[in-house]
Image: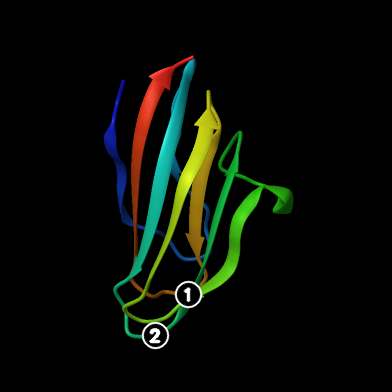
Amino acid sequence: MANGVQFAGEISLSAPEVIYTPGAAKVGVCTVSFCNRGSTATKVRLGYCASATTVAAFYLEYGVTIQGGGVLERTGIVLSGTQTLIAECETTSAMNVIVFSIEDTL
């Protein structure tokens, strides 16, 4: 059972990046925190799916603007098995993402 920080890093420009997957026979409850280290506003996306490619119906956030120095946090996201959490930013701003989770077996 892996608890605590699952991902911490800078996300890429306009390319979905896998930031968390609980793994087979597990369930994870997580919090995702976006931090815009840059001075200009940028838009972010957060979604979940069974792979690194998601469809519009599975976005939790889509095109949300985070001002320079601003943050966005989503809590209580529940993923099971191999569901994957992805994140993406729409500009080259320095956008950091941290995922904290608590996992348990199914």
* Residue 35 location, quadrant: bottom left
Mark sitting on residue 27:
none
Tell me residue 81's x, y (percent): 53, 23
* Badge 2 amino acid: Thr
Q: Which one is nearer the viewer's eye here, 69 or 17?
A: 69
Residue 83 position (above or below residue 71): above
Alpha-carbon span between mark 1 and mark 2: 9 Å
Mark 1, other Cα within 10 Å: few <14 / some 14–19 / many ≥20: some
Q: Which of marks 1 and 2 is nearer the N terminus?
A: 2
52 displayed left or right of 105: right
Label pair 1/2, CB-CB below 8 angstroms? yes
Identify which residue is drawn at 44% across, 30% down: 28
Mark sitting on residue 91:
1
Quadrant including the N terminus:
top left
Question: Residue most toward the bottom?
Answer: 40
Identify which residue is drawn at 47% across, 74% down: 91
Mark 2, other Cα within 10 Å: few <14 / some 14–19 / many ≥20: some
Tell me residue 33's x, y (percent): 37, 57
Q: Which one is nearer the viewer's eye here, 52 or 103?
A: 103
The mark lying in front, picked from 1 and 2, is: 2
Mark sitting on residue 40:
2
* Badge 1 amino acid: Thr
* Figure label count: 2
Residue 22 position (above or below residue 54): above
Q: Is mark 1 on a helix, strand or loop?
A: loop
